[in-house]
Image (cartoon, rainbow, N blue to C red):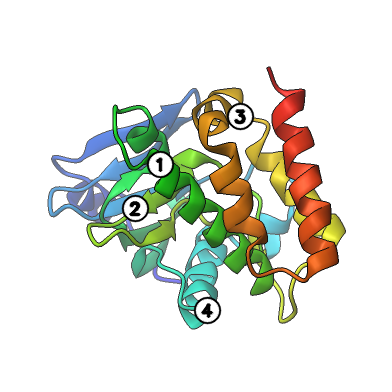
Amino acid sequence: MPQLSNEQFSALRRHAEVIEADRYGEKVLKLADGSFLKLFRRKRLLSSATLVSHARRFASNTRDLKRRHIACPEIIDIYRIPNIERTAVHYWPLPGNTLRQLLALPCETHSKLAHNLGILIAELHNKGVYFRSLHLGNVVQGEEGQLGLIDISDMVCSSTPLGRLKRSRNFQHLFRYERDVDKLRPYRNEFIEGYVANLPDKVSDHFRKHLSRLFEQIT
């Protein structure tokens, strides 16, 4: 992993726009050329980031997604920045708008968007992708209507489809966001049918009921 000096980091972030920050400092920067720099800090003294940095994991996940033909950001490089005790991933963003942005606008195609989201999640699960950061702000629709993922550092990819338990647990991540559920609720049937469309009959019946219950639990 290349190391950036303080001078190199300052030059890279010159004229950057701060997209996200917290009390510890900057988290996401939009650089002058339109590329993005996502900064990671180690949150605990003993953590998985000690062995594999979040930046490396982000880059590795893009490779895993591309092998599965799922749209995601394009990695430029990953860095270690000792002066600010951060690692960073430098990437070209996935063009488009998040589903959270799109569903907040008046539109006649929201039902199709919800249906396609169900199809995307089914594709992820069938291809062994457990996306812990699953919410409408992390799914992007491109200009041609295809859906893809962003903010993908917190993800596990396996070589086999996810079982029922992991699928159900993954949906819990999505249903934690009440405002997202509120946007999807008018199109719940389209969303559910998109997800179950290509599942075996017994599994399809199970998740049709399970997802219906999840929508009913959040009012």
Mark 1: amino acid: Leu
Disc on res. 177: 3
**Dot 4 corresponds to which residue?**
68
- Earlier along the polypeptide chain: callout 3 or callout 2? 2
Contact between labelled residues 4 and 2, with CB atoms less than 8 Å apart: no
- Earlier along the polypeptide chain: callout 1 or callout 4? 4
Contact between labelled residues 4 and 1, with CB atoms less than 8 Å apart: no
Give neighbour class at mark 3: few <14, some 14-19, many 20+ (Cα, 10 Å): some
Contact between labelled residues 3 and 4, with CB atoms less than 8 Å apart: no
Give neighbour class at mark 2: few <14, some 14-19, many 20+ (Cα, 10 Å): many
2 or 4: mark nearer the eye? 2
Residue in the foreground of this view, choosing between 139 and 40? 139
Give how far apart the Cα atoms at labels 3 and 1 are: 13 Å
Q: Secondary structure at mark 1?
A: helix
**Dot 1 corresponds to which residue?**
99
- Earlier along the polypeptide chain: callout 2 or callout 4? 4
Disc on res. 26: none
* Residue visible at 63% across and 40% down in the picture: 174
Q: Secondary structure at mark 3?
A: loop
Establish if 135 lies above or below 142: above
* Residue visible at 68% across and 41% down in the picture: 173
Establish if 115 lies above or below 135: below
- Earlier along the polypeptide chain: callout 1 or callout 2? 1
Q: Quadrant of the C terminus?
A: top right
